[in-house]
Image (cartoon, grey):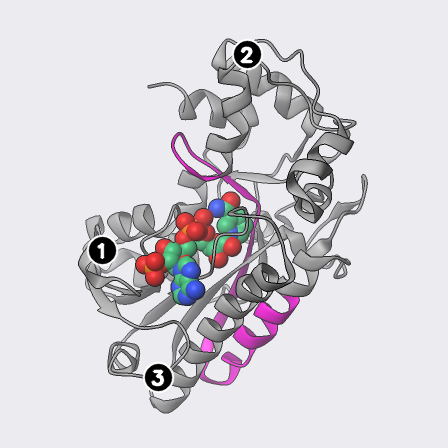
Amino acid sequence: MYGTIPGVKIVVAGGTGFIGEPLVRRLLALGHEVSVLTRNPDKVPAGRGVKWDGKSQGPWSSVIATADVVINLAGENIADGRWTAERKRQLTDSRTDSARALVAAMKQAKQKRTFINASAVGYYGTRGDEELSEEGSRGTGFLADLTASWEQEAREAEAVSRLVILRFGVVLAGEGGALAKMALPFRLGVGGRVGSGNQWISWIDREDLLRMIEWVIANEAVRGVYNATAPKPVTNREFTAVLARALHRPAIMPAPAFALRLAFGEMADEVLLGGQRVVPSRAVAEGFAFQVPSIEASLRNAFAK
Ligand SMILES: NC(=O)c1ccc[n+]([C@@H]2O[C@H](COP(=O)([O-])OP(=O)(O)OC[C@H]3O[C@@H](n4cnc5c(N)ncnc54)[C@H](OP(=O)(O)O)[C@@H]3O)[C@@H](O)[C@H]2O)c1
């Protein structure tokens, strides 16, 4: 088992981000050798920075040739800026190009390895109260199209690797990510539910996500698509109440749908007003143990300091 033996050679593309940086630190602490594919090697906070552009082959491919595990988290940030046609193209291309480049580098090398590619629960689109395991069908909308194209590129690695695609829910941690954005109105005393509040939020505590990635690395039998979400998704209404309690702030100002559409455009419908009720059926059935299964525990930890 990889996970129990230190010294595994691991490459993390996008290893400088909200998920990547703590992942790299954790893998280093476990004694693994970690290289980070990045556009700015001078700014890599942890691990050995190796320069790439996220699309073309270059000297970086040699680290892939000797890697036991390749993890792909690279991509332009979904929530940074309005989804104009140009921005949507960047969001999609930065993911499909980087996956394609990694797969091409893996195909050049003879050795078989583990390839973990990020995806997102946006794959399922907005689906009301329907409970969605990994068997759930692809939905509609920009994020469903983006993740489907991303996964399709990653699947090209199946012939040369043990492929695992993780459909991440909203990743929660005390600093950064979606929670920092969601908490801000509450900190200002103007927080409240979003739209009707009935839409589902499939979330995962970042610590559990990092543990799940370790579990994937350690278990050869894990392959294919997994929902990387906590076992209990919540509605926006429930999330709002727990967030307000964790921050000791009121939740009195609902954000109306029309105002969100005005402010965020198309992103409002898919990310804020829409949602999906996703469950981690495969991870649970195959023995992954969540340590932060409730939203109360996750938000309490996030704001404990
Ligand atoms: N955070 C969440 O809640 C969440 C939920 C669902 C899915 N995901 C997915 O999980 C992945 C990691 O998420 P994150 O929150 O850690 O993202 P993040 O903080 O935005 O980091 C993404 C990383 O991708 C690299 N990157 C950005 N634009 C790029 C480009 N044009 N070409 C190549 N690399 C580029 C950056 O590395 P360098 O600047 O060092 O090159 C950056 O460190 C993302 O693909 C995201 O879509 C995240």
Secondary structure, mark 1, is: loop
Q: Quadrant of ligand 1?
A: bottom left
Picture coordinates of residue 227 (x, y %)?
A: 59, 52
**Residue pointed to by mark 3:** 57
Secondary structure, mark 3, is: loop
Is ligand 1 less than 8 Å from the beta carbon at label 1? yes
Q: Give the mark toward the camera: 2 or 3.
A: 2
Picture coordinates of residue 84 (x, y %)?
A: 63, 56
Does residue 282 sit above or below 204 in this rendering?
below
Q: Within the magenta stretch, is there residue 172?
A: yes
Distance (Cα) linking label 1 and label 3: 20 Å
- Point out the tag, 2 or 1, that comes first from the N-terminus: 1
**Residue pointed to by mark 2:** 189
Picture coordinates of residue 58 (x, y %)?
A: 29, 83
* Number of other residues with Cα within 10 Å of mark 3, as a class: few under 14, some 14 to 19, many 20 or more: some
- Point out the tag, 1 or 3, that comes first from the N-terminus: 1
**Residue pointed to by mark 1:** 44
Q: Within the magenta stretch, is there residue 130?
A: no
* Visible residue check, residue 261: yes
